[in-house]
Amino acid sequence: MSKVLKIPINTPIEFISGGHFISEKPWIHTKRNIDSFEIIIGTNKTLYIEQNGAKYEVNPGDVLVILPHIEHKGFALGEENLSFYWFHFYCPANYEIIEEATMKKEVSLKSRSDICI
């Protein structure tokens, strides 16, 4: 089951940088530990990336959130023409990582409470 990043909206996130990475040859993500969040959206081929010991394969259309202050690195070589969009941002300290099922329940409860009869 997927996990979801839950961010309060009373304080906006702060965009840092972003771009579209395209490899010209086989490529592996460098080992890093950064102070911001990163969203990776796969667009072509598969990105093999590990975060905190968990291995992920980011395929076209997949989205992965890299958490701040946690080491991440490639664990396998990606093919030539691998590509993905990446966005770095800061957000309030009171974020949560929740299960997808919990998110669906919360969204459903909030949607029902907005209905006026």
Image: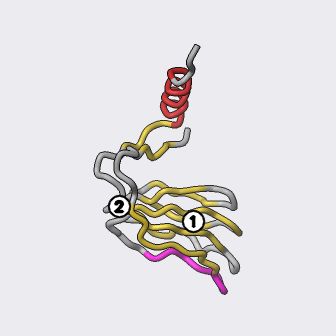
Is residue 20 left or right of 103 when viewed as pictured?
right
**What colouring does the structure picture have?**
secondary structure
The stretch of residues the image draws in magenta is: 23-30
Residue found at the very far left of the displayed protein? 93
Q: Give the camera-side residue of 88 and 43.
A: 88
Name the residue tied to disc 2: 68
Give the residue type at disc 1: Tyr
Is residue 37 left or right of 87 when viewed as pictured?
left
**Element at label 2:** loop
Q: Is residue 30 above or below residue 67?
A: below
Q: Is residue 28 above or below residue 93?
A: below
Q: Is residue 28 magenta?
A: yes
Q: Residue 76 at x, y = what percent?
A: 56, 70
Q: Give the camera-side residue of 96 and 1.
A: 96
The quadrant of the image that shows the N terminus is top right
Tell me which residue sits at (36%, 56%) in the image.
91
Q: Residue 92 at x, y = what percent?
A: 32, 52
Residue found at the very far bottom of the displayed protein? 24
Q: Residue 106 at x, y = what percent?
A: 48, 29
Is residue 52 left or right of 100 when viewed as pictured?
left
Q: Is residue 4 above or below residue 30?
A: above
Tell me which residue sits at (55%, 27%) in the image.
111
Q: Give the camera-side residue of 103 and 53.
A: 103
Q: Residue 113 at x, y = what percent?
A: 50, 21
Q: Is residue 110 above or below residue 5?
A: above
Tell me which residue sits at (43%, 66%) in the image.
15
Cα–Cα span, label 2 and label 1: 19 Å
Marks 2/1 in contact by CB < 8 Å: the verdict is no
Q: Is residue 53 magenta?
A: no
Labels 2 and 1: the sequence-earlier one: 1
The circle on residue 48 is 1
